[in-house]
Amino acid sequence: MKFKLLLDLFDEKSNDFLSGEEISNRLSISRAAVWKQINQLRELGYEFEAVSRKGYRLLYKPDQYEHKDLMQNINTAVFGSRLHLLESTSSTQIEAIKLAEEGAEAGTLVISDMQTNGRGRLGRNWFSPAGKGIWMSLVLRPELPVRFMPQLTLLTGVAVCSAIRKVTGVEAGLKWPNDILVNGRKVCGILLEAATEDNKVRYCIAGIGIDVNLSELDYPEDLRSIATSLKIESGTSVSRSRLIGEVMNQLEARYLQYENEGFAPILKEWEALSASIGKQVRSVTLNQVIEGTAIGLSDSGGLMVLTEEGKNSTIFSGEVEIIQ
Amino acid sequence: MKFKLLLDLFDEKSNDFLSGEEISNRLSISRAAVWKQINQLRELGYEFEAVSRKGYRLLYKPDQYEHKDLMQNINTAVFGSRLHLLESTSSTQIEAIKLAEEGAEAGTLVISDMQTNGRGRLGRNWFSPAGKGIWMSLVLRPELPVRFMPQLTLLTGVAVCSAIRKVTGVEAGLKWPNDILVNGRKVCGILLEAATEDNKVRYCIAGIGIDVNLSELDYPEDLRSIATSLKIESGTSVSRSRLIGEVMNQLEARYLQYENEGFAPILKEWEALSASIGKQVRSVTLNQVIEGTAIGLSDSGGLMVLTEEGKNSTIFSGEVEIIQ
C-alpha cells in the first residue's frame, strides 16, 4: 500500500505525536509531500489531530477490507462468492450493472471502500465516505416476473435488518419499503434495480448502503438529524467484513426460503421487524395523499393503511413518511 | 469516406467491368490493396461480381445513412430528435443503455449500419449485416409502473407494423407479442428492455430490427425458411431513412395516444394488424403447455386462447408458436 511507510511510523509512536519534520527526515520526502499524504489518508477515512509545533497524532484508523477476511466471513454457496473489491468507484450499482451486462453470475458482489456518486432511491445521492460504511451491490438473476420485484426488495430489507441486529445488537427496524431505521434515524438504505425484457427480469442488482463506523461529525449538516450509524447507536466500532458476511448469509437463506415457500414467511418477518406498522404514516403521490395508521403488508408487498375515515388503502410505490 | 476514390471509378463505369489493373494504376495502390478495399466494401453491404480477366462490376450499392436525410424524414417532437449514428457496434441496445445510464433524454435514437452482436429476445442473437437492415434502439422514459411494459411492447409493434405497411405496401402482420411477419416469415423483431427501481421504470429501450434490403442469399442457411426482408416481399429496395422516419412518426403518435386514452385503442389496432388471432397457437413454458385458438388480447396485453376443451387461457410471457 502507498502509505505503508507513513502508517508504520504512526504505529511506532502508538498514541503519540509525530512531527512533520521527523516524518520528512525518516521517509526522505518533502514537508509538502508529508502534508499531502496526511490529507490523502484523511480522504480514506483516517483521522489525525494536528497541533502546531507538535505535529500529527493518529486518532482513528479505518477498518480496511481484506479479501481473505471477507471470504472467511461469507459462508454461502452463491451470494458473495465472487467478490469485486474496489477502493473507490462512482457507484457500486453502476459497476454491478456493467458486470451483469457482461454476463456476471448471480451472487457476484461489488464492494467499494467509498463511492464518489453513490446512488440512492428516486435518483437521490447516497453519502458514501471512505473506510466507514458498507457500500455494496449484489447481482441476482431471479427467475421471476417483474411484478415480484417489490417482494424481493422487502426480502432484502428483512435479511439486512436481521444481520444488523445479530452482529451489533442494535434494535434496527424496517421502514416501508426499504429503509432501516434506528431510533427514527436512517442507518441503511436498500435499492433494488432490475433490467427487464418484456415482463421478465434479466437480472437484478440489490444495492445496500450501511452507515457502519461514521461519527456524528462525519455527516454533512443536513444529514445529521436524519441519519445515524451503527457505531453511534451501539457505542462501538463494527467490523465491516463481519457484517457483510452476515448480510450475505441472511440474504441467501431468505432467498432460498422465498423460492421454496413463497412470500408469506418473509411477509411475517417483515412485519415483526417493522418500524412502520402501528405508526401514523403519510404517502404523497401526484394523484393523492394517503394518511392513516400502517396496519400491515398486503400479499404482494404493499403497505396497508387504515385511514381516519376507516377506509383501507394500500400503497404500492413512492415514499412513506412516518408522522408519529 | 475512405472508399470515395474507388467508388468514383465504379460510378464512372456505371454497369461495366473495371479491371484490378486499371484500379491499381489510377489510384496508385497495389493489386493487393485493391482486393482488400473491395472486400471491405463487401462487408459494408456492397456487392461485386468478379470475373477473371475482366475485373469487378458493382452490382449493388447499399443505401447509406446520411444524418441530414434522416433528420428530414423524422417529423417528430421528441422521438428520434437526438441521433447517434454509428457505422458498427456490438449492439444498439447496449449503446442505448449506456447513453440512458449517462442521462440521455427520452427520444434519443441509436442507429447502427451493422451490429456484430445484435441482441434478440430471450438472449438470442439478431443477424444484423451492414447496409441492408434497420438496427436501432430508442431511449424512452415513461412514467409507468413496470406492469405496463408489455403494453408498451405491443404499442411499439403496432407503430412499426403500420410504418412498414405505409412505406412499402407490404401486408405485414403482428405475431404475439412482438414479431412482425410477412407470409409467415419474420421481417422484424422488437425487444423492449427496461431498467427499473422497485416497481417504477427508470428508462426503457425499444430495440427495433427490420430486415429491409436483404436478398435471399444474404441470409445464413438456418434463417432462410424463417426470415424474410421487405425487399424480398415487395420486389423493390426500400429507403431505410424513410422507413426510420415513418417508424418514429407512428411511434410518437401512438405513445401520445396511449398517454391520453390508455391502452384500449392500441389493443384494437393490434388485433386488427394481428397475424396471430384466429390461428391455432401453442405456448410451452416450464409449467404448462397451452394450445388452442388465439381469440384476442386481454386488457393488460396478454394473448387470450380458447383451448379445445373450451377453456379460456391467457398467455403473459414466453413464446407463442403459430401452428396453422
Image (spheres, coloured by chain):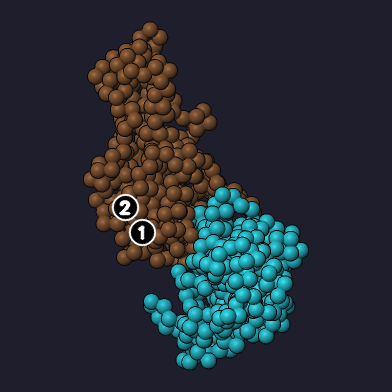
Chain colours: A cyan, B brown
Q: Evaluate whether label 2 is on the same chain as label 1.
A: yes
From the viewer's perspective, tell me whether residue B122 is left or right of residue B77. Answer: right
Residue B233 image position (x, y, % from top left): 36, 32
Mark positioned earlier in the residue sequence (2 or 1): 2
Q: CA distance from mark 2 to mark 1?
A: 8 Å
| Chain letter for the residue marked with disc 2 in the picture | B
Q: Can I make out residue B90 in this image?
A: yes
- Say which amino acid is labelled 2: Arg
| Chain letter for the residue marked with disc 1 in the picture | B
> Which residue is at a point 39% across and 17% down the rendered structure image?
B30
Kindly state the secondary structure of the residue where label 2 is placed.
Answer: strand
Q: Is residue B120 above or below residue A212?
A: above
Q: Which mark is residue B105?
A: 1
Q: Is residue A126 above or below residue B134?
A: below
Identify the image quadrant of residue A203: bottom right
Camera-side residue: B129 or A163? A163
Mark 1 packing: few (<14 Cα in 10 Å), some, or many (20+)?
Answer: some
Q: Which mark is residue A61?
A: none
Question: Which quadrant holds the N terminus of chain A?
Answer: bottom right
| Circles 2 and 1 in contact, beta carbons < 8 Å | yes
> Which residue is at a point 63% across and 57% down the rendered structure image?
A84
| Mark 2, residue position | B82
Identify the image quadrant of residue B42: top left
Residue A306 image position (x, y, % from top left): 52, 87
